[in-house]
Image (cartoon, helix red, strand yellow):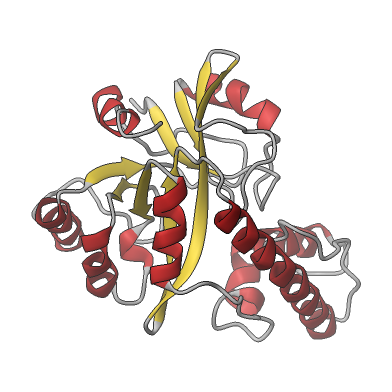
Amino acid sequence: MVYADLHVHTDNSDGTLALGEVPAAARNAGVEAVAITDHDRLHPDLDAPVTERDGVELVNGIELRVAADDQRLDLLGYGVRATDALVAETERIQRDRVERGRRIIENVEAELGVTLDVEPREGLGRPHVARSVVAHPDTDYDEIGPVFDDLIGDDGPCFVARDVPDFETGVALLSESCGLVGLAHPLRYEDPPAALARCDVLDAVELHYPYDRPVGDDPDEGGAALVRAAIDDHDLLATGGSDAHERTLGKAGLDREAYLAVRRRLP
């Protein structure tokens, strides 16, 4: 049973849930605590590290993309107290996101010969573009996955890279402002061992997530053994969540005991 889903996106970035809808979605899933981890952006309606809304505990968080040598990683910060430095960097990233979004939209429109019903803006992510492609009556796409596979994925013809901070800068910004900093979905990267080696300066790593090379339940099996070894070697806390961009929470996360270990580290 998932007690805490610590990786949830809202419509402040590229999720579909408004913040006010999160408690009901959590209750529907039997979830007691949720971390709001919008991409490269703090939620403007969360002004404390941890709050309670309609009987659900909400952790103020962020997912920050960083560059680490030849791959890009996602860091999760939990229990945010916004600093001037973090706010300034997220605002810079959002300006870059607007320009990047404009270029991706233009690329997709040129590739498909359509005009999409989506505009570049702060918080825009590729899922917004993919949903617009699916909704357009003159495309052959009926799911967002193939849009990523064919057009806007990292190797797709319409992809545009973001200008992200380096790993060291990202860790410094989050360590100053968050109670806990961890690595998201460790096996999704091109080089998981290199990504996990970076955990030596972090507090946590996601052990539970539901898709695209998840860790798995067998502690002795390939990827699971790598992640559990990193937890032991670097004395990490295990986190987890559904990485929800749609409306269903609780597909993965922590039980109550594991969440309380995380909660004790938050302001």
Query: Which quarter of the rendering shows the C terminus?
Result: top left
Residue at 21% in and 68% down? 197
Q: Quadrant of residue 152?
A: bottom right
User: Residue at point 57% right, 74% down?
Assistant: 149
Q: Position of residue 76 (x, y in %)?
A: 43, 51
Q: Residue 61 versus residue 142: which sits nearer the camera?
A: 61
Quadrant assignment, res 234: bottom left
Q: Which residue is painted at 65% across and 47% down in the image?
A: 15
Left or right: 145 with respect to 231?
Answer: right
**Does 9 sit above or below residue 59?**
below
Tell me the quarter of the image containing the N terminus.
top left
Residue lying farthest to the front in this orientation: 84
Q: State the residue at coordinates (65%, 86%).
A: 157
- Image position, residue 102 (x, y; %): 80, 74
Q: Position of residue 258 (x, y in %)?
A: 25, 31
Residue 31 in sight in this render: no
- Viewer-side residue, 81 vs 75: 81
Q: Position of residue 23 (x, y in %)?
A: 59, 23
